[in-house]
Amino acid sequence: MDFYILLADDDEDDCMFFNDALEELSIAASLKTVNNGVALMEFLNNNERGLPNVIFLDLNMPCKSGPECLLEIKESEKFRHIPVVMYSTSFNLEVMDQLYHNGAQYYIRKPADFSDLKSVINRTISTIKAKGAQRPLREEFEMQP
């Protein structure tokens, strides 16, 4: 069975790079993308029987931000079991602490280098497959390539 990934990101290029990186990995995975937080929550609510194994969630999106979506997901009985990986270009320790506190599984800084992107996606998916929804310690929260 495929590992089902949902990517919520408003940057089309970032979505394309993520998809290209995923295709080059030897992971049996399928990817669905949505381009804003409202679309993410609508998708989850309309597909309760086909929920993703993991959500990669951009921090800054239109309509509803990544942190708002994270709270909504983790407050929902139906969705809180889904690991959420925050995925952003920004690096702010206070924001990362808050995201960890609010239930995010991992935090990835979007790498500019394609091989680093492949590496960090592979590492994150492998870790989630191995550990499921078990959250890491705070010092292991940021996933490195």
Image (cartoon, rainbow, N blue to C red):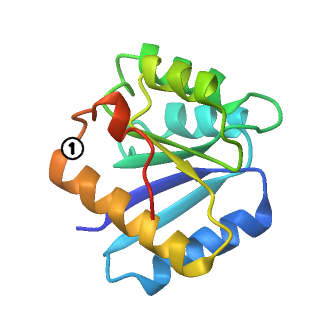
Q: Which residue corresponds to the image point at 37% horizontal and 70% vertical from the top-left? A: 29
Q: Is residue 141 left or right of residue 133?
A: right
User: Where residue 20 sits: x, y (%)?
Assistant: 58, 80
What amino acid is at disc 1? Gly
Q: Which residue corresponds to the image point at 46% horizontal and 86% vertical from the top-left? A: 24
User: Where residue 135 sits: x, y (%)?
Assistant: 27, 32
Per the image, the residue denoted by label 1 is: 132
The number of numbered discs placed on residues in the rendered structure image is 1
Question: Who is closer to the viewer here, 27 or 43?
Answer: 27
User: Where residue 44 sits: x, y (%)?
Assistant: 51, 36
Q: Is residue 39 left or right of residue 136?
A: right
Whether residue 118 is visible here, answered yes or no, is yes
Quadrant where the image shows the N terminus:
bottom left
Quadrant where the image shows the C terminus:
bottom left
Q: What SS does tag 1 mark?
A: loop
Q: Is residue 140 left or right of residue 22?
A: left
Q: In the figure, 134 relative to 4: above or below?
A: above
User: Where residue 31 sits: x, y (%)?
Assistant: 50, 64
Q: In the figure, 50 relative to 97: above or below?
A: below
Whether residue 52 is visible here, answered yes or no, is no
Q: Which residue corresponds to the image point at 53% horizontal and 50% vertical from the top-left? A: 108
Q: Quadrant of residue 136?
A: top left
Label 1 Cα neighbours within 10 Å, binned few <14 / some 14-19 / many ≥20: some
Residue farthest to the right?
Answer: 62
Question: Who is closer to the viewer here, 5 or 47?
Answer: 5
Question: Who is closer to the viewer here, 123 or 94?
Answer: 94
Q: Quadrant of residue 96?
A: top right
Q: In the figure, 23 relative to 124: above or below?
A: below
